[in-house]
């Protein structure tokens, strides 16, 4: 398949892991960078089509795969996040990648953070884009109201397969630059939001709604900055949801050494909204 750059060809491939066909995109050569999409309805490896060409041009091998239940990959029997976390090193092993850099958006940032804490020798770098679950909490009442609004939206989406207009509205809610929503991008995102992917989304939503409240034992993920041995960079949009700007600022205040950036004019879909800034920050980081 062709991407936005005429000088970079992105190949679409598949690999079978644990009996599931996993679709992935690959381009370039050099040190491997694995790009991990989030868990929103319609998410897939295609979210990184703006990010792969500059990484390839800088001398990196990029692999972005559709997680089970997303994109063109098979739907798993077990929809838990644990399966998706465990699949990341399995894909790396199946493709013979060795030590890799992780480039993770949204929910996958927490997965990548966990992997780097548990097995740091496997990962050379960690790039996190817009992962709200890693941020420290604010005032419980203020944050609770904001999160409740987001949860209501997600619950409504789990009741009926989206129309293409619904898909546009969801993209507009996560993008600052609405001009990026071309007809082609909209059609692609919508195709990843219906059918088996919508059915998997409903199952995941029901699992999350029925899950008992977690009892945290030990420090939260955001409090383990000093334990993280893998070089990391974290990038957030200033206009992201769930009071992200305030929480990012608080995190930086508590851990001044953290390599953290805030991008103006950027909401939650950081790989789209801030593709140029992501390349500007991440390529020197990966080469360092």
Image: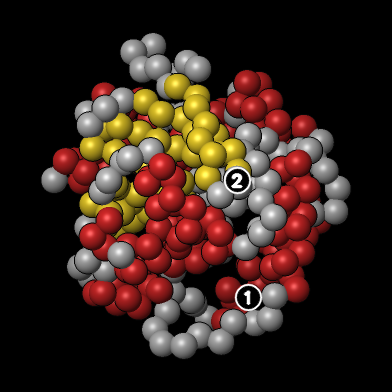
User: From mark 1 to mark 2, how far is it between C-alphas?
Assistant: 40 Å
Q: Residue furthest right?
A: 160
Q: Residue furthest front?
A: 19
Count of residue discs: 2
**Closer to the camera in the image, 180 or 99:** 99
Q: Nearer the viewer, mark 1 or mark 2?
A: 2
For the C terminus, the image quarter is top left
Query: Considering only vertical position in the picture, is 69 above or below 189?
Result: below
| Residue name at image x 23 percent, y 37 percent | 31
Mark on residue 19? Answer: 2
User: Counting residues from the N terminus, which is met first, the one under dot 1 or under dot 2?
Assistant: 2
Mark on residue 16? Answer: none
- The image quadrant that residue 60 belongs to is top left
**Element carrying mark 1:** helix
x then y, percent, for residue 9: 40, 17
Identify residue for label 1: 144
| Residue name at image x 43 percent, y 22 percent | 10
Query: Considering only vertical position in the picture, is 48 above or below 204?
Result: above
Horizontal relation, residue 32 to residue 25: left or right: left
How did the renderer colour the structure? secondary structure
x then y, percent, for residue 67: 56, 46
* Mark 2 burial class by Cα count in 10 Å: few <14, some 14-19, many 20+: few
Q: Please say whether residue 65 is visible from this viewpoint.
A: yes
**Element carrying mark 2:** loop
x then y, percent, for residue 259: 25, 59
* Mark 1 burial class by Cα count in 10 Å: few <14, some 14-19, many 20+: some
Q: Please say whether residue 103 is visible from this viewpoint.
A: no
| Residue name at image x 36 percent, y 17 percent | 8
């Amino acid at each position: 398949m062709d991407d936005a750059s005429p000088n970079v060809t992105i190949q679409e491939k598949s690999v079978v892991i644990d009996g599931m066909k996993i679709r992935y995109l690959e381009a370039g050569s050099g040190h491997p960078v694995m790009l991990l999409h989030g868990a929103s309805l319609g998410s897939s490896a295609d979210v990184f089509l703006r990010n792969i060409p500059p990484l390839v041009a800088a001398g990196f091998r990029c692999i972005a795969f559709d997680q089970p239940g997303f994109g063109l990959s098979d739907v798993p029997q077990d929809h838990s996040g644990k399966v998706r976390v465990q699949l990341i090193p399995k894909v790396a092993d199946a493709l013979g990648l060795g030590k890799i850099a992780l480039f993770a958006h949204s929910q996958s940032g927490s997965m990548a953070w966990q992997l780097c804490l548990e097995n740091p020798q496997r990962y050379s770098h960690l790039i996190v884009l817009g992962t709200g679950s890693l941020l420290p909490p604010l005032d419980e009442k203020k944050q609770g109201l904001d999160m409740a609004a987001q949860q209501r939206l997600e619950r409504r989406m789990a009741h009926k397969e989206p129309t293409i207009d619904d898909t546009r509205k969801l993209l507009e809610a996560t993008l600052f630059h609405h001009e990026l929503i071309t007809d082609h991008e909209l059609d692609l995102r919508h195709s990843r939001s219906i059918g088996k992917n919508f059915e998997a989304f409903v199952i995941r939503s029901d699992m999350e709604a029925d899950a008992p409240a977690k009892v945290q034992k030990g420090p939260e993920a955001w409090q383990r900055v000093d334990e993280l041995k893998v070089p990391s960079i974290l990038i957030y949009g200033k206009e992201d949801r769930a009071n992200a700007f305030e929480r990012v600022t608080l995190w930086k205040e508590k851990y001044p050494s953290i390599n953290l950036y805030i991008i103006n004019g950027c909401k939650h879909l950081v790989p789209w909204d801030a593709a140029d800034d992501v390349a500007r920050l991440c390529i020197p980081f990966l080469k360092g």
